[in-house]
């Protein structure tokens, strides 16, 4: 529930701030604001897989294991018996990743000042004056650097099964940010002022998460001192999954947001704003819908560490059904009521045509489902989705670049849908069901509540 609340307010600008932006900003400024939000999502990509890897590793140490499995073979052969929390392993993990996150911050800076700058430059040039927006983008870069460092502490907190605490802190921080942005907009503020508010609250949540971790160790009777002490053997164990997950994240960004990057380079502010607005709302729905399973990933990883597949199957099936049901309901609501609501408030920026929205909705449904299975499977610390993600992203960008000028948005979203359907939408599902020894028929029965004796005993 706290993760839902956190997600709701974290993406609150899509619900509370965005309507005011749509009313007060020109279409060109709306395009810039939506692209800035797209660049902010690059912070997760710039994390390069370290955050999810830390969650998995911390979950293993928190469960009492002495060593994180190096690959899928070690995972299958590992003794599931565990003892109490491995505090030494947790501290070594945190210090090792503290060292790597310094380098990560440097590479992220280069990434945002090159790739990120390229994505937003076309939209910024359509707005006068552009100088203030360039300053706003630099503020965004600094904000992203703090947020990347926050991911390290937040991931550790989630790994020790304190998801509720960190999501509560995020909810409070994001609520304060929304209120501050709301006031700024009422006073006539523009994008620069909004980004300064975002920077302030990113700094605050970063320092809070760092303080929380140190206090948690103290409460457990351990004095944790943050050191730049790199542990080679541990990093060597985690790195294979880490770099594959990083590549998968880059590929995932291209498959999910590659269409937005292509649209942002068009010389049509109205079309850019229309597509980016639709894309943002659909991604918000996905974020809310994936919460039932994603909020419980530390628990899922602990069940996998103990190889408690009997309960794991039932637990995952319930959360997958809940997430898919939430997404279907919200997508139907978006398709049915978005245009009447926008017309009522006289918002001039429109959404994408209904045919485009339907294809985008189908795509996001399939992506949510295969994303659930990919996350569960990676609890084994094996990440086999690197090449499919990158190749799919390249195909979407390459084909989409040639299609958009001929067939427009409908051709672009169809390209994304068909590329994902050809492999990514089914391969993670296949791998995960195979890992859990879960027959497809039994899986479908579990989703529909028809639990069989075979499922309960497997």
Image (cartoon, rainbow, N blue to C red):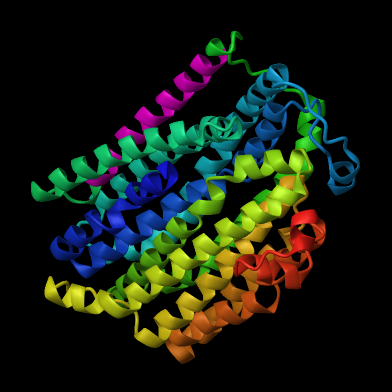
The residue lying at 43 percent from left, 54 percent from top is 39
The residue lying at 16 percent from left, 77 percent from top is 343
Main SS, magenta residues: helix
Q: Position of residue 304 (x, y in %)?
A: 74, 44
**Left or right side of 78 for 207:** left
Vertical comparison of 379 with 157: above or below: below
Q: Is residue 215 magenta?
A: yes
- Quarter of the image for residue 280 reads bottom left
Q: Which residues are magenta?
A: 193-217
Whether residue 410 is visible, yes or no, is yes
Vertical comparison of 395 with 22: above or below: below
**Left or right side of 174 for 361:** right
Whether residue 118 is visible, yes or no, is no
Vertical comparison of 165 with 435: above or below: above
Nearest the viewer among 48 and 339 is 339
Q: Residue furthest front?
A: 453
Q: Position of residue 383 (x, y in %)?
A: 75, 52
The residue lying at 51 percent from left, 52 percent from top is 292
The residue lying at 91 percent from left, 42 percent from top is 77
Q: Is residue 23 magenta?
A: no
- Quarter of the image for residue 203 reads top left
Q: Position of residue 359 (x, y in %)?
A: 48, 82
**Left or right side of 297 for 350:** left
């Amino acid at each position: 529930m706290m993760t839902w609340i956190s997600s709701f307010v974290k993406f609150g600008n899509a619900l509370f701030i965005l309507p005011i932006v749509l009313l007060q900003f020109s279409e060109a400024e709306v395009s810039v604001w939506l692209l800035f939000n797209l660049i902010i999502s690059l912070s997760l990509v710039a994390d390069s897989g370290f955050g999810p890897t830390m969650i998995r590793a911390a979950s293993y140490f928190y469960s009492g294991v002495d060593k994180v499995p190096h690959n899928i073979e070690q995972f299958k052969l590992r003794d599931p018996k565990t003892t109490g929390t491995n505090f030494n392993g947790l501290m070594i993990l945190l210090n090792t990743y503290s060292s790597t996150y310094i380098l990560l911050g440097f590479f992220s800076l280069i990434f945002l000042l090159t790739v990120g700058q390229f994505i937003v430059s076309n939209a910024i040039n359509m707005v006068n004056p552009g100088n203030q927006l360039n300053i706003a983008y630099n503020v965004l870069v600094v904000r992203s650097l703090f947020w990347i460092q926050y991911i390290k502490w937040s991931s550790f907190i989630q790994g020790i099964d304190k998801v509720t605490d960190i999501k509560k802190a995020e909810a409070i921080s994001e609520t304060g940010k929304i209120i501050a942005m709301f006031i700024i907009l009422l006073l006539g503020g523009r994008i620069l002022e909004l980004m300064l508010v975002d920077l302030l609250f990113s700094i605050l949540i970063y320092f809070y998460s760092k303080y929380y971790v140190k206090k948690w160790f103290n409460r457990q009777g351990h004095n944790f001192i943050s050191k730049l002490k790199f542990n080679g053997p541990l990093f060597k164990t985690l790195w294979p999954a880490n770099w594959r997950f990083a590549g998968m994240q880059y590929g995932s960004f291209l498959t999910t947001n590659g269409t937005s990057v292509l649209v942002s380079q068009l010389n049509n502010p109205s079309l850019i704003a229309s597509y980016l607005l639709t894309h943002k709302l659909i991604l918000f729905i996905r974020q809310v819908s994936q919460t039932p399973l994603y909020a419980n990933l530390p628990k899922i990883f602990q069940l996998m560490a103990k190889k408690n597949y009997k309960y794991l199957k039932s637990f995952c099936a319930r959360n997958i059904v809940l997430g898919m049901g939430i997404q279907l309901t919200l997508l139907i609501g978006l398709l049915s009521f978005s245009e009447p609501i926008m017309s009522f408030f006289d918002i001039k920026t429109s959404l994408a045509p209904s045919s485009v929205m339907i294809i985008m909705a189908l795509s996001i449904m399939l992506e949510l489902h295969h994303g659930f299975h990919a996350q569960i499977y990676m609890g084994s610390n094996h990440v086999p989705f690197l090449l499919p993600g990158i190749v799919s992203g390249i195909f979407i960008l390459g084909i989409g670049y040639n299609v958009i000028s001929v067939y427009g948005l409908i051709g672009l979203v169809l390209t994304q849908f068909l590329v994902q359907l050809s492999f990514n939408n089914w391969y993670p599902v296949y791998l995960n069901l195979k890992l859990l020894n879960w027959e497809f028929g039994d899986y479908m029965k579990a989703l529909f509540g028809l639990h069989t004796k075979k499922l309960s005993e497997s």
